[in-house]
Amino acid sequence: MQLEDLIFETGEIALLTLNRPKALNALNRQVVENLARVLRDIRHDHAVRALIVTGAGDRAFVAGADIAAMSEMSAIDGLEFSRLGHRVMQTIEDLPIPVIAAVNGFALGGGLELAMACDLIISSEKARFGQPEINLALIPGFGGTQRLPHRIGHARARELIMIGDMISAKTALEWGLVNKVVAAEQLLPEARNLAAKLVGKSGIALRQAKAALRASFTMEEDAGLRFEQAAFGFAFSSADRIEGTKAFVEKRDPKWQHK
Ligand code: CAA
């Protein structure tokens, strides 16, 4: 599927590329609406078992929301843009499959927010991360004030959001913002390698793990712990659980049915 500004290559491991390299893949309303459309299709396509999100070109993953477009927006337009962005980030978090951000360059503002909506973040050595909205007299608008402290703690999140400086891939790794840093040419191979490992798991169990992990962010601890019990029970009721535990006892590799 080829939408303007987005390239979607389907498959068991699908690849979604933000494709506005001249604007460092900045997110305007049209791109975000197209993202919503593609994500809806992915959600209903059972052949897709993992998704990699990356940016076109060698400079940027996504350098944020489109500042030129925002400079023309009314206050109401801005509010609607934020709501749209939030819906897309939540849709990524709610996808029943694992999503990997392969960050090939700048991941700033809405770009870092997009990466943080993904389950795992693999970074090129050249990548740089930040929430520089404060320098535009703005604040993160696609979930950054909530997801960033959850990922790296309040002290560092306050530093990034209130001072607005960028950090290197090395620092992002030290701060626990990204899972792994690799050479630029290894970024997609490494993301595919990780996706292949995920595809080798029971899709049912992965879906429950993802939902329960999300509950740690969206629910109070007591409700989250109860959510985990229900998710564990759901995984326990699957054919894959019977196969997985049996295969261990019988000292053989499991064969997943993803049900
Ligand atoms: N929106 C629109 N265009 C952007 C952009 C953005 N976020 N980021 C970069 N571009 C454009 C530039 O305007 C430039 O276009 P032209 O060639 O037509 O002039 C092109 O991409 C290349 O950028 P630069 O010439 O600026 O490249 P550089 O190497 O000198 O700097 C950079 C790179 C540091 C990333 C710089 O472009 C920059 O600071 N970009 C803005 C980053 C930012 O503030 N992001 C947050 C946006 S607000 C937001 O995201 C809100 C939210 O949470 C929803």
Image (cartoon, rainbow, N blue to C red):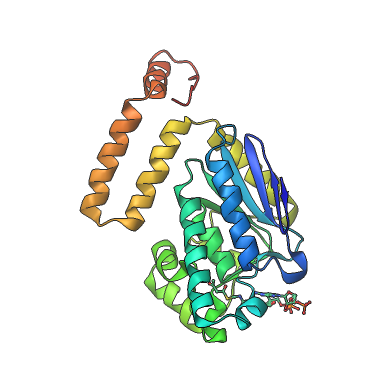
| Picture quadrant where residue 29 is located | bottom right
Q: Residue at x 44, y 37 (%)?
A: 206
The spot of residue 61 in percent (x, y) is: 66, 62
Residue 55 percent across, percent down from the top left = 69, 58
- Give the residue displayed 43% in from the left and 17% down from the top: 247
Q: Is residue 34 above or below residue 205?
A: below
**Would you identify the image quadrant in which residue 4 lies?**
bottom right
Q: Name the residue at 56% across, 68% down.
A: 110
Residue 190 locus on image (x, y percent): 65, 45
Residue 187 visible in the shown view: yes
Total numbered circles: 0
Q: Is residue 166 above or below residue 215?
A: below
Would residue 21 appear left or right of 135 to someone viewing this image? right
Image quarter where the N terminus lies is: top right
Q: Is residue 175 visible?
A: no
Picture coordinates of residue 137, whole percent (x, y):
52, 87
Residue sitting nearer the eye, 245 or 51: 51
When the figure is inspected, residue 60 is found, relative to residue 139, above or below; the finding is above
Ligand 1 shows up in the quarter that is: bottom right
Query: In which quadrant of the rendered image does the C terminus lie?
Result: top left
